[in-house]
Image: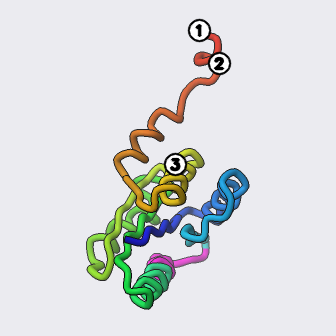
Amino acid sequence: MEEKIILLTHGDWGKTLKSSVEMILGKADFVSAVALTPEMLLAEFRQAVEAAILAEVKKAQEKHVLLHITLMTDVFGGTPTNVAAVIAKEREDCAISVITGLNCPLLIEACTQISFGGELDIKKVLASCQSSIFDVMEKITGK
């Protein structure tokens, strides 16, 4: 099974986040980003997401491999998440998961799993990343 990640965000920070993660881990060719820009209509954004998915589906079909795409979105209830959920329910040509709450530790964990294990375990990614948000001073001082 081939794993792909598509970042769906308000603005271009998905692309920037990918670049930041690549500074830490190295190249992540299996990650791409689609930005929702202020001038885009809902239909245009959905079309852009569908095009990104279709490109990955075609590549997988050419290689004769099964495909799993994880759509990572920034904000639950926002347009990127809503579009991702609708597409994930409708598409039947590949397996699609949707995760919201995108942040650097989440993407690092997912990329590490794919780079070193080949497969993405969504439950392990979520469990690992839920502990990545905390009060630093409380953690280091115990107060």
Which comes before the other along the chain, label 1 or label 2? 2
Which numbered disc flags the more N-terminal residue, 3 or 1? 3
Q: Secondary structure at mark 3?
A: helix
For label 2, the crowd category at 10 Å Cα-Cα, with few meaning under 14, some 14 to 19 and many 20 or more, is: few
Q: Residue at x 54, y 69 (%)?
A: 30
For the N terminus, the image quarter is bottom left
Q: Earlier in the sequence, mark 3 or mark 2?
A: 3
Q: Out of 36 and 101, give the one closest to the viewer.
A: 101
Mark 3 or mark 1: which is in front? 3
Q: Is residue 43 visible?
A: no
Callouts 3 and 1 close, C-beta under 8 Å:
no
Part of the protein shown in magenta: 39-49
Q: Quadrant of residue 16?
A: bottom right
Split into 4 quadrants, where in the image is the C terminus? top right
Look at mark 2 in the image and give the residue it sits on: 137
**Against 17, is 136 above or below?**
above
Name the one closer to the observer, 26 or 38: 26
Tag in front: 3 or 2: 3
Identify residue type, mark 3: Glu
Question: Secondary structure beneath disc 2?
Answer: helix
Q: What distance separates the C-alpha of mark 3 from that of mark 2?
A: 24 Å
Q: Secondary structure at mark 1?
A: loop
Q: CA distance from mark 1 to mark 2?
A: 8 Å
Residue 139 at x, y percent in the picture? 59, 18
Kind of residue at badge 1: Lys
Q: Looking at the image, which residue sits at the far right?
A: 23
Which of the labelled discs sits on residue 78, or is there none?
Answer: none
Q: Amino acid at mark 2?
A: Met
- The residue tagged 1 is 143
Residue designated by label 3: 109
